[in-house]
Amino acid sequence: AAVRTYDFNVTWVNANPDGLHERQVVGINGQWPLPVIEVDKGDRIIVNMHNGLPDRNASIHFHGIFQNGSTEMDGPVMVTQCPVAPGGDITYNFTVDQNGTYWYHSHVDSQYPDGYRQALIVHDKTFPFDYDEDIFVTLSDWYHETIESIDPSFLSLYNPSGAEPIPDSFLFNDTQNSKIPVKPNTTYMLRIINIGAFVAQYFYIEGHNMTIVEVDGVYTEPTPADILYVHVAQRYTVLFTTKDTTDTNYAIVTVADSDLLDTIPPNLTLNHTNWLEYDSKAPFNEANITVDTSDDLDAFDDSTLIPYDHQELLPDPDYEITVNVSMNNLLNGINYAFFNNITYTAPKVPTLFTVMSANESVVEDDAIYGDFTHTFVLKHNEVVQLVVNNNDGGSHPFHLHGHTFQVLSRSPEYDDFTPFDPNNHTDFNDPPIRRDVLVAHPNGNFVIRFAANNPGVWLFHCHIEWHLFQGLALVLVEAPVQLQQTLQIPDDHYAVCDKVNVSSKGN
Ligand code: C2O
């Protein structure tokens, strides 16, 4: 295994990825799009991050990486570390014992949609399926203003319904109308990553059949798909084989899910064509787009995929958490998001540091973690079941840090709130697919399960950045006794807290 060292100097740079508007974006070493992290399973990743932003805190989360034994390297601020203040430094240092498709992004509130996100790929020398070439694409929504400049009006009395700001455009590999050169008669492994902040996208390639082989780092039984539905933070890897002729280029179609948008401005383009480029002299035709966003989601149910390893359903849970999701006004008239009527508020000290400094006699007592962090303490190796009932008319892509979870069941969309009924349900999926981001459909529910075998402090939250900002998060303190006994937090991680500029936003 190798050590892969990255020196990241984070600064503002200018970019105009949609050709409509130049703006400041968060760059690394003066560049944007950001560098891709590409490693092999077993490698050690070392990222020396310098926050060269004069006016923003920063951090990095390595989305989907388990951080087994290294929870302090996970990156969400006020969960496992303090935000790195302007001029500050932090080193992330961990080994990767997983294969597949991941990404990295800032985990300071409202920062990654300013461009601070990119693919993280773990290549697998023993990948179980045949292919010739390994490529990836990123999809994302894009705003013309910095998110911090949008936040004050979003979370305000002037937006009592909590309507999410509508993106100004959509990007594909951080650009538009891009051409991916391909060779004829070749099988491609194509990784698709939605690195956006809000909007799910449909994805298909004209004239080519896709076979799903991975979701969120978990290999699947090869499963044909005409179209994918990729919500933010989700990843799919598909295999496809190119034609034997090169006289036509083929459209890669992406369609933003308009069901998520409260209004569709007339100048917003939801459908985009990019191309598989067989021959640069052959025609590049715009796609004839056939997605019906009110229907085609029904044709694609990722909750019924089968994991390639056929890992069985975990036994009945030792510990069960049921949360109802709602979006509502607090008495001050501003729209917040809630799990069981609690809107997440970051503590003054990262929860991980509270674990490490607590007396062993109280470390398993969730009362020490603060009422508004919505913390649950899990015992080492117990089986945990999490039931999410979505009492909201929007979909939510929920993400668990530190784990993939088994998807036991997931309901369709309903017109009226329909919580999971433990006394009246069909069989759970077995073997269940595992992933790290699962969509809860409007007014529907899902049931997931995982083993608490990774001591750490892990966030569970909606990956729509607006909803996280509204407080749609809870914290799992997993095996705190074992954590106290085994974890050593490096000095530089503690030192970051000394430099936090309290006048700047802490979470
Ligand atoms: Cu992509 Cu809290 O993470």
Image (cartoon, rainbow, N blue to C red):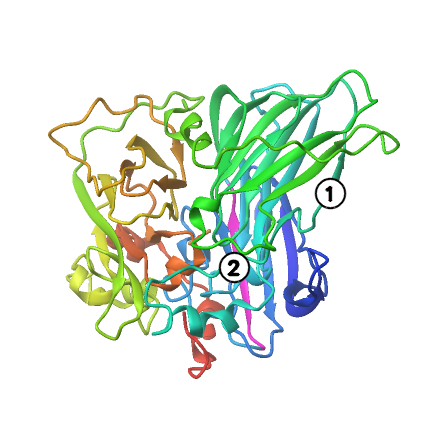
Residue 495 placement (x, y as % from top left): 46, 74
Residue at the bottom extreme, as displayed? 503
Asked which secondary structure carries label 2, the reply is loop
- Residue 2 shown in magenta: no
Instruction: State the extent of the magenta-drawn residues as a range.
Output: 87-96
Residue 165 placement (x, y as % from top left): 47, 61
Quadrant of the snapshot with the C terminus: bottom left
Residue 256 placement (x, y as % from top left): 53, 44
- Locate residue 20: give its quadrant: bottom right
Is label 1 or label 2 in front? 1
Residue in the foreground of this view, choosing between 40 and 257 = 257
Residue in the foreground of this view, choosing between 168 and 363 = 168
Report the side of 244 relative to 329 (left or right): right
Give the residue type that dot 1 points to: Ser
Residue 377 at least partly seen: yes
Residue 65 at least partly seen: no
Residue under label 1, please give it: 178
Question: Residue 81, labelled with which disc?
Answer: none
Quadrant of the snapshot with the N terminus: top right
Report the side of 173 relative to 218 (left or right): right
- Locate residue 130: give its quadrant: top right
- Residue 88 shown in magenta: yes
Residue under label 2, please give it: 60
Residue in the foreground of this view, choosing between 1 and 255 = 255
Taking the spot 59% from the left edge, 64% from the top edge, the residue there is 49
Q: Residues within 10 Å of mark 2 (few under 14, many from 20)?
A: many
